[in-house]
Structures are given as structure tokens and as C-alpha cells.
Image (tube, helix red, strand yellow):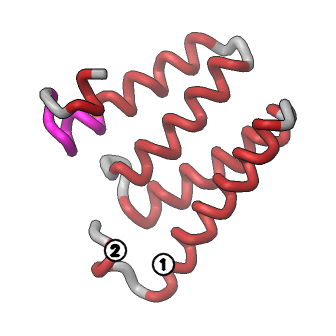
Amino acid sequence: MSKKDLTPEESKKLEKSRNLTAKADELWLEGRYAETAPLYEQAAAIAAEITGQNSLEYCSALRNLANLRYVQGKYSEAEDLYQRTLAIMEQELGPAHEDVVD
């Protein structure tokens, strides 16, 4: 779904998702991982609702959550999330895209 396809309400929700991510990023930098997780989870849920579970917006939210799980030592959970983000990126960008190959 492109930005122009969003209703005003959906745009507000997506902005909320981005604000949650920004707040989570701040907490991450402070090492407050337990407080970070719910915000990233909320952001991912909103992105999935508004843009779909195969969107790059959702993919970005999942990658944030995967990075957090990795730092928390939850490697199996992180790997599952990384695999999902890779699948989305391959689907949306193509397997030869520079962001997928890296």
C-alpha cells in the first residue's frame, strides 16, 4: 500500500507506529531493552494492520524487533524474525536487490 492509498485515519495510525519506534529507539540507546520490546511490538502490529504483513514498513518494524531479541540473547526468536524480514525483502525488492544481498 502506498502512502497515497492511506486514509487520514490510517496515516495517523502509521505515524503513531513511527513515533513508537522513535521512542523505542531512544530507550534502546539507554539500554532499557525491557521497555523497548512492547513499543517495537506495538509498532509492528500497527504496521501490519495498516500496510500488510508483506510490506517494507512491517519488515522494518520486524527487523527492529529482531535486533532487540538478538541483543537480549533470544537468538532463536531473533533468527525467526530475521528470516521473515528477509522473505519480505526478497518478495518486495527482489532477491538481487542490494538490501537483500547484504
- Indicate the quadrant where residue 2 lies: bottom left
Query: Residue at position x 19%, y 41% from top?
Result: 93
Q: Say which element carries label 1.
A: helix
| Residue 80 place in picture, x, y as percent | 47, 20
Sequence-wise, the earlier of marks 1 and 2 is 2
Query: Residue at position x 60%, y 11% from top?
Result: 75
Q: Callout 2 environment at 10 Å: few (<14), some (14 to 19), or many (20+)?
A: few
Q: Left of 48 or right of it: where is 31?
A: right
- Indicate the quadrant where residue 30 lies: top right
Who is closer to the viewer here, 49 or 68?
68
Query: Residue at position x 70%, y 12% from top?
Result: 73
| Residue 81 place in picture, x, y as percent | 48, 27
Q: Disc 1 marks which amino acid?
A: Ser
Q: Report the magenta residues as a range.
A: 88-95
Label of residue 101 in the image: none
- What residue does disc 2 label? 3
Please tell me whether residue 80 is drawn above or below residue 87 in the rendered image: above
| Residue 76 place in picture, x, y as percent | 56, 12
Report if the CB atoms under discs 1 and 2 are less than 8 Å apart: yes
Query: Residue at position x 59%, y 27% from top?
Result: 67
- What residue does disc 1 label? 11
Q: Left of 12 or right of it: where is 55?
A: left
Q: CA distance from mark 1 to mark 2?
A: 8 Å
Q: Callout 1 environment at 10 Å: few (<14), some (14 to 19), or many (20+)?
A: some
Please tell me whether residue 88 is drawn above or below residue 83 in the rendered image: below
Q: Say which element carries label 2.
A: helix
Most common SS among magenta residues: helix
Does 49 appear in magenta? no
Q: Left of 56 or right of it: where is 42?
A: right
